[in-house]
Amino acid sequence: MHTDITTNLTPPPDLYSANHLINLHAKRGQLDLAHQLFAQMPHRNIVSWTILVSGYAQHRKSEQCFRLFSQMLSHYKPNDFAYASLLSVCDYWRGLQVHGLALRTGFDAWIYVANALMAMYWKNSCNPSRDAWRLFDAMEFRNLVTYNSMIAGLGMQEQGDKAMTLFIRMLRDGIVFDRTTLLSLVSSLCGPNQGSDKVVGGLLCCLQLHSCGIKTGLALDVGVATALIKGYSVLAAEIGACHKLFFETNGLDRDLVLWTGIMTVSAEREPEQALILFNQMRKEDLCPDCYVFSVLLKACANLVTEATTSAVHCRVIVAGFANLLDLDNSLIHAYARCGSIDKAKRIFYEMSLRDIVSWNSMLKAYAVHGKAEAALSFFKQMDVVPDETTFVALLSSCSHAGMVEEGTKIFDTMYEKYGIVPQLDHYACMVDILGRAGLLTEAENIIRKMPMEPDYVIWSAFLGACRKHGETKAASLASSKLKELDPENSLGYVMISNIYCSVNSFDEGGSIRTKMNRVGVKKEPGLSWTEVGHRVHEFASGGHRHPQVKAIRAHMKELLSQLKKMGYVPDTSLVLFDVEEEQKEEQLYHHSEKLALVFSLMSAGNCGVDGGVIKIIKNIRICLDCHNFMRLASKLVEKVIVVRDSNRFHHFKDGVCSCNDYW
């Protein structure tokens, strides 16, 4: 074997055989042996030098590669392959030197060298667009590699619109695209921080690229299908289109990346579907890796109970991924979001290794469950340096508990003690802390003095505080800001309308709702979910979606009769229409979380409610009337009722809520 060749090896006498042997050693990574043979050759040609230069380049030995190339200049004029090999490992400054040499020797016009120069600039330049475009425009001939390099580079610079323009130019030049072109183009459309106009344009481009893929048959390529699925998900949250595209790949050699992609799409918005897909993937004899389990745990975090999280946890252990840091962090998050902070704590304290994500995950868990004092105590135990996310979790904890003084102190010491400059999320927390406590002037001052422009989250927090304390003037300002920042979001319209209606200004409230409908903005419907008999049931306000709506309403009447004896009084100020009091009460009784609770109670005799705990998820914040309803119901039925709304967990037990009626 060649690995046994000794240091006094003599190269073959003929040049062809010697070059072949050097190439063999170089490809195997035996660069010392290759270089020794090269040094002992009595005669060398340009091929000998190029083989060794290429070998060093392929194994990322940039210093040796550059040194050998420099030595070659004394003997031979480099060929295009030598230039391209060297450029693949050059940094920016060395790349400039090689570019200058190529210009002097005329090799810059060789398309193979020009493409390598372009790739070097995209990878290393501080202004890659300028340098790459300058090179591209100067090229007399361009091929598929040229265009693919430019499109990929523009995608890395989040210039998807320019990548699409170049793609059109490529087609006009008669260059036939391939799968690499489509992959780069679709990826370029899915960059972060896309504005609404870019998202719409990006979706249109994605549809056009999909059509191109169908016409050429490339849409059935597993890699292209994976990219398109991600594109539809990011640009339009269009789960249906993603699933349709995925199922069109049935019969192809679907790989783990494709399955992971479609499960990722479903994990947040259709978590049950992600689990179904996982079971289908297993039927195709694909073994899940840690990324698949990470996606599954993300799906579990959006389910009602922790039973599925526990099942996935068992699979993680069986698959041999126990004590893997990233998965342990995902388990902490999943258990906490399913309402089991005790299991999240157990995972944390059993971990053999923890990082900042582990600590932050537990801090977030304490925050969302309203355990501010536990969060502050836990923070003092941290054995890693806190980061920006740490302080967002701490400030959120203070906000949920009304701890104004503690929150202000944490905010003030972020930079003084830890050198962390407050960002938008930290300012949003401070606005929330002050606003909830009724300190609206102080909250507004925070917004005015911020060193950056307030974003949607900050104005949302301020508007929520205005609603809580009935401040219509400041609310009008916040509402207008929200409409400017995101004209298609209903929050700015709905909350200011609610504020007017809560002070009996129904004409103003109705006018805002009319304007909202006129511009085509739709309000997010109130939905709740609860799990009964290993099945998740969905409820919308009014209950019309559920097949047992008549039985639920009958049980609701019985429950209301008992709760009113305990002191429950419907808070009709929350009804946003100027109608009779009886009609207002009727609307309140059919809020989605109330219906979910009643259904759980009427089903408890058949299915049982595990551990005497009823868990409900709600997609928007729980209203004051439903909060009072749940609080009294927990005492009446002698069960723990856990409601996770869009903001936090509410644990109702014996007529008391964990939030202490502050949310």
Image: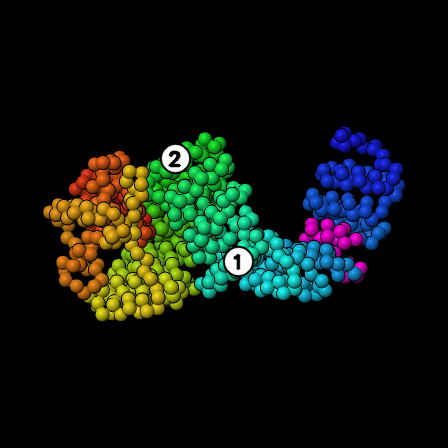
Instruction: Give x and y (percent) for residue 5.
Output: 79, 31
Q: Amino acid at mark 1?
A: Ser
Instruction: Give x and y (percent) for residue 559.
Output: 16, 46
* Residue at mark 2: 311
Foreground label between 2 and 1: 1
Q: Is residue 516 left or right of residue 1?
A: left
Residue at image point 68% right, 66% down: 137
Q: Which mark is residue 211?
A: 1
Q: Amino acid at mark 2?
A: Ala
Residue at image point 80% right, 59% down: 105
- Between discs 2 and 1, the one toward the N terminus: 1
Q: Secondary structure at mark 1?
A: helix
Q: Residues within 10 Å of mark 2 (few under 14, many from 20)?
A: few
Query: Can residue 161 be seen in the rendering of this structure?
Result: yes
Q: Which residues are magenta?
A: 79-105
Query: Can residue 477 be seen in the rendering of this structure?
Result: no
Q: Is residue 595 left or right of residue 479?
A: left
How is the structure coloured here?
rainbow
